[in-house]
Image (spheres, grey):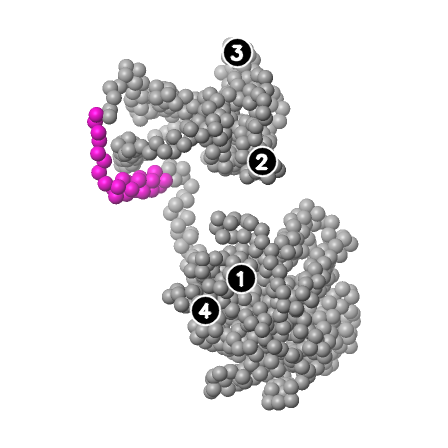
Amino acid sequence: MLLAVLSGLIISLLIIPFGKLLTTKWSFLLTILPASLFLYFMSYVPAISAGSSFLQHINWIPSLGVDFDFKLDGLSLLFALLITGIGTAIFFYARTYLKGYIFFDRFFGYLCLFMSAMLGVVLSDNILLLFVFWELTSISSFFLIGFNNDNSDSRKSALTALSVTGLGGFFLLAGLILLGNIAGTYTISELIDARELILNHELYPLILGFLFLGAFTKSAQFPFHFWLPGAMKAPTPVSAYLHSATMVKAGIYLLARFSPILGGTDYWNYPLMAVGGFTMLFASIHSLFRIDLKGILAYSTISALGILTFLIGLGTREAIIAASVFILVHALYKATLFLVTGIIDHETGTRDITALGGLRKVLLPVSIAGILAALSSAGLPLTYGFIGKDLIYEATLHTDYQTLGWILNAVAIATNIGLVAAGFMAGIKPFVGTLPKQFENIHLPYKSMWIPPLILAILGLVFGWFPGPVGDFINHATANAVYGSETDMYLKIWHLNIVLILSVATLLAGTLVYFVNKPSPSKLKAIEKLNSIAPQRIFRGYANDIMRFSRWYTDLFHNGYLRSYHLKIILFAELLLAYKLWISGPITLDLEKITTPSFYEIGVIVILIGALYIVVTTPSRLTSVVAMSVIGYCICLIFVFYSAPDLAMTQFTIDTLSTVLFVLVLYKLPSFINHTGKAILYRDGIIALSFGVIISLIALRVWSEPISEEIANFYGENAYILAKGKNVVNVILVDFRGIDTMFETVVLSIAALGVYSLIRLRLKSTEKE
Amino acid sequence: MRSPILQSATKYLLPILLLFSFFLLLRGHYYPGGGFVGGLVASIAFVLHSFANGTEATMKILRRKPLSLIPIGLGVSTVSMTAPMLFGLPPMTGLWFEEPIPVIGMIGSSLFFDLGVYLVVIGVILTILFTISLNNLTEKD
């Protein structure tokens, strides 16, 4: 499973060197990846539907509780099949859709990255690992939304999407860490055993709040839904894949995954029902007034996500079954509708439904796919959508809530009426009626573009005819995984009861709405006002404030003068050190510990003070640098007196080299002119003096503290035994603390690269002038 | 400030200092010395040479950019760090040859680690110094 999850990452890495090859006829190679993963996951279907689940454990960072734990159960399997199955269709489709596009290879790199991340989310059995993949999906979504990066709208939408989902991600992380700390484990399958502990913990509502924020932002629930319509700036295959079939369902997955652990309480049920219920109705009404095909689909997706949230909030057996079926239903028809929209956009150059019509005459197979998908979304009998809708009604009818149940049912019906009409608008409207003149010479695109949506649409029909096997094989296991115990479920084509009547009524009402409702730009404007109650504006204002703050902060701290940087760094260090000294109490000096300085030591100190005097008073920079190096050598001598030859040697060489460096730089600088006034001189003097005083105080404190011999003894004793070295300093550097040394060398290298590239780049830019 | 005395002195000093720096590197595990100091001494040798003969002349002796020493050094350190993993040991475990080698002494993975540090230090210092001294920084403003 690890390989299955990581294969996308590996491929996207390979695309960096070999990407250009893919723009040729070799691009079909890419489709092998999702297709083979799909087959791989299909091979698990018999075992999973028989009730087993698969675990894989690989140590990653066991000390932090982060491991590669993967689990494949019914819920994961359903999502994995959707991700890879629809992924296959999308890969085929996008190959043609983006043919000849300049960033073709980059696009597939992001897409592979996303597929990996999404598989990681649904297969992770470790909540921290899940979080890592979760963030990775946000990042890949960011790149895909902003794919047309020369368009400022795309960039803005991408940033909005990233900041909303990223914000939710923060909360999710907080919730997951709380959860893991309370339960004492980060493994999802072990969290279930800690259910009682978590539910009775006082922080339980807080965990739920954080988790919900994560899920709601990801799954575009009201009031965070606004990023999703913006995300439609992405190329259509991306919208189909990420923003309707898979990524936005990550939030739903999260809720479903955690419902056996955290669910079944009022804290869980009511917020989910309220938010989900409101979102589904709100978005469903909204979708009716859109004129952009992708806008309709975006809002109906939000509505569908609302339905799923709502069903998980209901939490009854029927609701969970309905959710597990509806995930599949929705993915099938919505992906189809998106792909169909993509073809229409690709061929006609417009997505305005008021301008489109009669396309069945030129795009027959596409229209079949679109109409089938629309029927499935409308829940016409004999489609899988019908069964999904049936189950939703059944779930709302069979609740423990008396009056509330009827309200819920009414909301579900109203939502579905809207969705029926929206589905017809997106899937049927462009194909019926008269064909406008300018579209007459349109012809079918390549097969690889219209076959994937057609297959998906036909699947929706086939599943509707044979719901039994599909239910047994896939949805049954899903429902069991979410519900936590056995759910007996038999999907049937018909139920002759009140549910059927409601379904038919919905269908009729929806069709009526479709015929009556004529969306127009003016209506759209009116309905847009509704959106202003969403915190979209707050988000924008917030973003602007951050920009303003960072500008102010940058002006304050990064004014480009080296002297001001030095001043600030030293002042800050002084404040911290002085504070630390202050709170750690008075220093007691044991004068008896002071030994009489030797003749040599006094000599060195005298030289040192003399050099110091020259440094401060000399008018020449060169003299002051040389005097500084005298100070360095004096310190070096002191190291020698106190038998630290390694330190002395290093200090000596470093001092030599830094003097050389100074001289080199000074040589290049314009000659020194004293501009500074008295006030600045005094200020700098005071800062320098106080820094010296603080460092001296620290030295005294260190000296007066009792020395812990433990560490020194450990290294002294073990240097030869463990590391076969007699020079303890060196053994510490290359063995005991070798990783530190490694990173230090890396830091050094980065510094050298920085100097090299800065100076070189600057030279080039001056050359240009 | 080309001085013939310094020029002829560096002719002999450069190899001697380089040898000395290598000596420091090798003895580091038992006596004062080590890759870091060794690297510093070696860079000083080159810097001295460049003072006497000009940076271009030193670059000629080096044959390639000192920048290229950095990845080599990092590579050597990384390999010596991860090599124990090939034997199923945690990274950074010291691996040692059983018998000491004549002249050099005991050879172990930490010596190679130190060698990497040595190379990186030379690369970093020479890159910084030579980039600065080779380029004309003066701005006309």
Q: Which residue is mark 4?
A: A535
Q: Quadrant of residue A549?
A: bottom left
Pointers 4 and 1 in contact (CB under 8 A)?
A: no
Q: Which residue is mark 3?
A: B9
Asked if the stretch drawn in magenta spans residue A237, the answer is: no
Q: Secondary structure at mark 2?
A: helix
Span colored in magenta:
A568-592
The residue at 28%/33% (across/down) is: A706
Q: Identity of the amino acid at label 1?
A: Ser
Q: Which residue is mark 1?
A: A189
Q: Which residue is mark 2?
A: B84
Same-chain status of marks 2 and 1: no
Question: What percent of the width, then of the height, locates residue A674?
Answer: 34, 30
Mark pair 4, 1: CA separation: 36 Å
The quarter in which the C terminus of chain A is drawn is top right
Q: Secondary structure at mark 3?
A: helix
Asked if the stretch drawn in magenta spans residue A573, the answer is: yes
Task: Tell me the crowding category of disc 4: few under 14, some 14 to 19, or many 20 or more residues within 10 angstroms, Cα based.
Answer: some
Q: Identity of the amino acid at label 3?
A: Ala
The residue at 41%/48% (across/down) is: A554
Question: What percent of the width, then of the height, locates residue A683?
Answer: 28, 37
Sequence-earlier tag: 3 or 2:
3
Label count reads 4
Answer whether residue A757 is visible to the viewer in this image.
no
Mark pair 4, 2: CA separation: 55 Å
Mark pair 3, 1: CA separation: 74 Å
The front one of A311 and A187 is: A187
